[in-house]
Amino acid sequence: MTEENIYANLTQLGGATVQPKSPEEAVLEKVPNPQKDTGYCVRFTAPEFTSLCPITGQPDFAHLVIDYVPGDWLVESKSLKLFLASFRNHGAFHEDCTVSIAKRLVDLLEPQWLRIGGYWYPRGGIPIDVFYQTGPAPEGVWIPEQSVAGYRGRG
């Protein structure tokens, strides 16, 4: 498989792109996994994720950790960054944001396994952490701990 074949259908990589106005408008792209016969874990960390409170419109902040064991597909990272940035003006509760991101990735990639940890900074003095995974991790694949400390002025 040549690089040209892998990346031929991408529309955002390598060029200027506009930040999507909403998660629904955001285009997530995938590329064939050139190591699909090897079990391995991919991690994306977004320590400055933002969305809006759907009631007050005030900004909410989270540290997201997304781990997945790919099957036939990999998510293209620029499209993931733009997708995550599209939540900046999106009003939703922490639970909805976190689980919606996971489900969108699962629908796109059909991974062997995926989990997300949404470590949200306090709202009203209470941090809310949201966790989702598709099932047990595949045997024989090293899945590191997410290692985000409990809230103590996170950082």
Image (cartoon, rainbow, N blue to C red):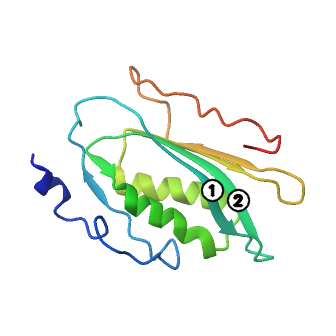
Q: Name the N-terminal-most of marks 1 and 2.
A: 1
Q: List x then y, in percent, for residue 99.
A: 58, 55
Q: Would you call the spot at circle 2 few (<14 residues within 10 Å), some (14-19), or many (20 or more)?
A: some
**Residue drawn at (52%, 79%), measured in percent from left and top?**
21
Provide the residue designation for mark 2: 61
Q: Is residue 79 left or right of residue 65?
A: left
**Residue visible at 51% across and 71% down in the picture:** 23
Disc 1: CA contacts within 10 A as few (<14), some (14-19) or many (>=20): few
Q: Amino acid at mark 2?
A: Phe
Outermost right residue: 125
112 horizontally vs 45: left or right: left
The spot of residue 35 in percent (x, y) is 23, 36
Identify the residue at horizontal 17%, vertical 53% (top origin). Answer: 6
Left or right, residue 9 beside residue 129:
left
Q: Which residue is mark 1?
A: 48
Find residue 52 and report its horizontal and vertical position in percent.
70, 71
